[in-house]
Amino acid sequence: VQLVESGGGLVQPGGSLRLSCAASGFTFRSAAMSWARQAPGKGLEWVSAITRDGSTYYADSLKGRFTISRDNAKELVYLQMTSLKSEDTAVYYCTGWRSWGQGTQVTVSS
């Protein structure tokens, strides 16, 4: 099983980023997938999840700004992030099928 995140970077407050997670080594279409994040000096925080049938769930504090989606044909899961704030600065992890990616850094700063 391999999960590889990409798309992180430096963005100004109010900006947007789209993270991608490429999955391999398991039956992706059968797996629920999630994103989690860890801000500097803080614990791991669950961000969002998408079930195998496309139902989506979000942390209450992020509703309306983040959107999770998946492409089963390409075995990709996405996290579209808008109206980014400094407190969104974190390492973002893709997780599913009992596995975690290596994370991608998102820094929101002017």
Image (cartoon, rainbow, N blue to C red):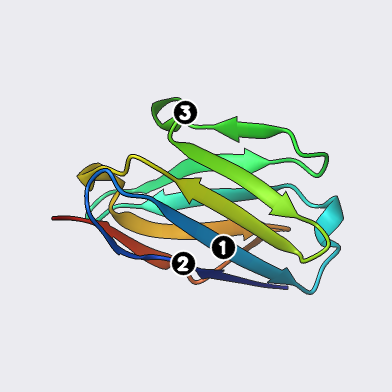
How much space separates mark 2 and mark 1, taking CA atoms? 6 Å
Please state, as top left, top right, bottom left or bottom right, where the C terminus lies in the image: bottom left
The amino acid type, in three-letter code, at marker 2 is Gly
Residues 14 and 26: in front is 14
Q: Residue at x 29, y 52 (%)?
A: 39
Residue 86 x/y as whole percent: 21, 46
Please state, as top left, top right, bottom left or bottom right, where the N terminus lies in the image: bottom right
- Residue bearing the label numbered 2: 7
Above or below 74: residue 57: above
How much space separates mark 3 and mark 2, taking CA atoms? 20 Å
Query: Quick one: label 3 or label 2, which is nearer the N terminus?
Result: 2
Q: Classify mark 2: helix, strand or loop.
A: loop
The amino acid type, in three-letter code, at marker 1 is Ser
The amino acid type, in three-letter code, at marker 3 is Lys
Q: Which mark is residue 63?
A: 3
Q: Which mark is residue 20?
A: 1
Q: Is residue 13 left or right of residue 64?
A: left
Query: Quick one: label 1 or label 3, which is nearer the N terminus?
Result: 1
Determine whether label 2 and label 1 are within 8 Å by CB. Answer: yes
Q: Quadrant of residue 67?
A: top right
Instruction: Give the farthest residue toward the left.
Output: 110
Q: Residue at x 22, y 54 (%)?
A: 12
Above or below 73: residue 44: above
Q: Quadrant of residue 91?
A: bottom left
Q: Is residue 110 left or right of residue 23?
A: left
Determine whether label 1 and label 3 are within 8 Å by CB. Answer: no
Q: Quadrant of residue 49?
A: top right
